[in-house]
Structures are given as C-alpha cells and as structure tokens.
Image (cartoon, helix red, strand yellow):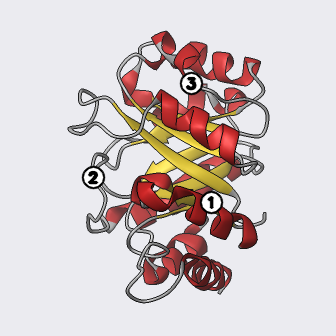
Amino acid sequence: MNKEISLSMMCADPLRLEEALNAFKSAHADYLHVDIMDGRFVPNITLGTDYCRILKKSSDIPLDIHLMIEEPENRLDWFNFGPGDLVSVHVESTKHLQRVLHAIRSRGAKPIAALNPATPLQPLNYVLDDIDGVLVMCVNPGYSGQELIPATVQKIKDTRNLLDASGHPDIRIEVDGNVSLKNAQLMSKAGADIFVAGTSSVFQPEKFTLSEGISLLRKAIAS
C-alpha cells in the first residue's frame, strides 16, 4: 500500500491558513487531519464544524476528520464530509459503533475505527466488514506535543497481524501522536499506512518550511 500523510490542522497557524493550504497542495498532501474535541471525551476543545466547512471550500485536499466526541451518532450531520474523506470514530465513544460507521459510509466517506492507546483490539473483530481503516492512537488524545507511548508500536504490529489474518489486508492503519521523523520510521515498519503529521515533524517553522517538512516525512516513512 502507498504510504500517505495527513496534515494536522490543529497545528497550522490559523492566521496563515491560505499559505499553509497552498503549501500542502504543492507538496501533494494526501489529507487534512481535523481534530474535533468536545471537552468530554477528551479534556480539550479544538476545531469544529465551521472549520470543516472552510477547509472544504478552500481546498480540494480530502478531509481526515477525527471525532473525539461523545455520542458521535447524534452529531454526524453537523459536519461537512463526503466521498474521498476519512472519518474516524472512537470505539470508546459510542454504544452503537456499527450504526455510526454505516452512517459515515452512507455519505460516501471512508469509516475508520479509532482506538485509544490502552484499548484492546478485540472490538475490531466485529466491525471489520464495516471499516476502511483503523486509527491507532500513539498518545492519549487531547493535546499535541506528547511523548510516544512505546507500547503502541507493538500495537500497530498487532493490528496489522489481526487485519491480515482475518482476510482484510486492504484495511489501512492510521497512526496519530508524536509521529516524528524517527518514530514514523518505526511506525511504518510496524505496518502503518497513514501518518498524522503535527508539531513533531512537519510543523517546525524554526527548522524547515511546510513543504520541506512533508518531504522529510515522506522519506522517513519510505525508508
């Protein structure tokens, strides 16, 4: 599978959004990762519905919407997504996971099941026919700049083994949390396919431009 990069919009300078989007397009970014936090499922409140609409209007790069919210089945209609977009919903956030996944797919988007670092893989066994991807959180969600939880690298391997053994090698693995250039190599070797890039890799203006950061990350995940 091709290795892809999803740019964390939580880390983009909101006052230079147009400049960032132009750089992402020039660098052939694969997705724009939009963290949606409600202050309940995670201890933070970040991007929201209007931001998704702005991105849809301003860029043709597909969205990668990460819903870190309670009861997402009651809020999907708030968000602007459709064919080509990714939408991740946490297995811990709803009592009706398949209902949410089906609702996402009915709008043409690709449903992804997200797992917090300490959440076991077992719930995936019952939704493998309903998902296009698994999002493995490598830090506890809520804030950028956290250190990698080492055990999650093995979790990526375990996820890849589960998917392959169950006859679903086409289901992709996305990784989010301290995807630094060094960690991205480990994650890639462990079986990750989509890499959420934040302040530990692409968004380091004191070291390199956004385009240069994307290029460096592509090299890291390909090595």
Q: Left or right of 129: which side holds 138?
A: left
* Quadrant including the N terminus: bottom right
Disc 3/disc 1 C-alpha distance (Å): 20 Å
Q: Name the residue under label 1.
A: 21
The image quadrant of residue 76 is top right
Which amino acid, mark 3? Phe
Proximity of marks 2 and 3: CB atoms separated by less than 8 Å: no
Q: Position of residue 204 (x, y in %)?
A: 41, 79
Q: Residues within 10 Å of mark 3 (few under 14, many from 20)?
A: some
Q: Residues within 10 Å of mark 1 (few under 14, many from 20)?
A: many
Q: Position of residue 24 (x, y in %)?
A: 65, 66
Farthest residue, direction left: 43
Q: Mark 2 points at which residue?
A: 143
Which amino acid, mark 1? Leu
Which is nearer the N-term, disc 2 or disc 3?
Answer: 3
* Quadrant including the C terminus: bottom right
Residue 190 is at least partly visible in this image: yes
* Residue situated in front as seen by the camera: 96 or 163: 96
* Residue situated in front as seen by the camera: 69 or 8: 8
* Residue situated in front as seen by the camera: 67 or 61: 61
Which amino acid, mark 2? Tyr
Kindly identify the residue that appears in the image at 42 percent across and 89 percent down. Answer: 207
Comparing marks 3 and 1, which lies closer to the viewer? 1
Kindly identify the residue that appears in the image at 52 percent across and 57 percent down. Answer: 17
Comparing marks 2 and 1, which lies closer to the viewer? 1
Kindly identify the residue that appears in the image at 32 percent across and 68 percent down. Answer: 150
Q: Where is residue 139 in the image (x, y as percent from the top left)?
A: 32, 56
Tag 1's secondary structure? Answer: helix
Q: Name the residue under label 3.
A: 79
Disc 2/disc 3 C-alpha distance (Å): 22 Å
